[in-house]
Image: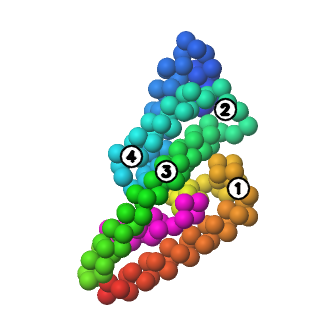
Amino acid sequence: MKTKDDEIILLMQNETKQERGMRMMMEVYQSRLYWLIRRLISDEEIAKDILQETFIKAYQNFFQFKKDSQLYTWLYRIASNEALQYLKKNTKLHRVEEEIDVYLEGEMASESIKSADEIQELLLDAIQKLPEKQRLVFSMRYYDDLPYEEISKIVDMSVSTLKTNYHYAKEKIEQYILKNSEDRK
């Protein structure tokens, strides 16, 4: 029995059926890729644009897909690279967003934590404060529960380096949440 990936690959390799293969690829992976991008890019509209760019690149470069990895791994890598490229191009904008975040944190510090939503917000804020690579590794491991070996293929980093990045990211997030939840009491 063929898997969805096998079916998508066969359709994409056939010029007359590529459109159908692309639609199926988007149907299967759109949501997962969107949430990967969304965890890296806080703006919903920009995340949608990056998702669209991801699928365009996948379509244009499908001939480069090697079956030595899963289709999702390949798409994940394209999506994460697109998101990181966006972040690098917009470092100035990112600095402005950080200043706004600092202001909002100050405003929120006067209130106490009242709900799981506020804790979730603290977590998302902490993740946004991480360096790009740590944010990417943390998101893939924490949210998507990907094994280090799979993440290694996606970000082209050794497993030991990934584990170190994940460990540091986790520590920074814990410290951020502790500090900011104490400030709110």
Tell me whether the residue at label 1 lies in contact with that at label 4, contact meaning CB atoms closer than 8 angstroms: no
Q: Is residue 144 above or below residue 124?
A: above
Q: Residue at x 45, y 33 (%)?
A: 27
Is 88 placed left or right of 48 in the picture? Answer: right
Relative vertical location of residue 49 with respect to residue 140 in this rendering, above or below: above
| Residue of label 4 | 46
CA gap between label 4 and label 2 equals 26 Å
Q: Residues within 10 Å of mark 2 (few under 14, many from 20)?
A: some
Foreground mark, 3 or 1, reads 3
Q: Residues within 10 Å of mark 1 (few under 14, many from 20)?
A: few
Query: Which residues make up the magenta segment?
Result: 116-134
Q: Quadrant where the C terminus lies?
A: bottom left
Q: Nearer the viewer, residue 177 or 117?
A: 177
Q: Is residue 35 left or right of residue 18?
A: left
Q: Residue furthest top?
A: 16
- Which secondary structure is most common in the magenta stretch? helix
* Nearest to viewer (mark 2 / mark 3): 3
Give coordinates of residue 88: x percent, y percent: 52, 53
Q: Is residue 183 above or below residue 41?
A: below
Q: Are marks 4 and 2 in contact (CB under 8 Å)?
A: no
Residue at left offset 65%, top offset 51%: 155
For disc 1, the marked residue is: 157
Q: Position of residue 30 (x, y in %)?
A: 46, 39
State the residue position of label 2.
65
Q: Amino acid at mark 2?
A: Phe
Identify the secondary structure beneath mark 2.
loop
**Of pointers 2 and 3, the one earlier in the residue sequence:** 2
Under tag 1, what secondary structure? Answer: loop
Give the labeled residue for mark 3.
Answer: 89
Query: Where is residue 124 drawn, in percent x and y?
Result: 41, 65
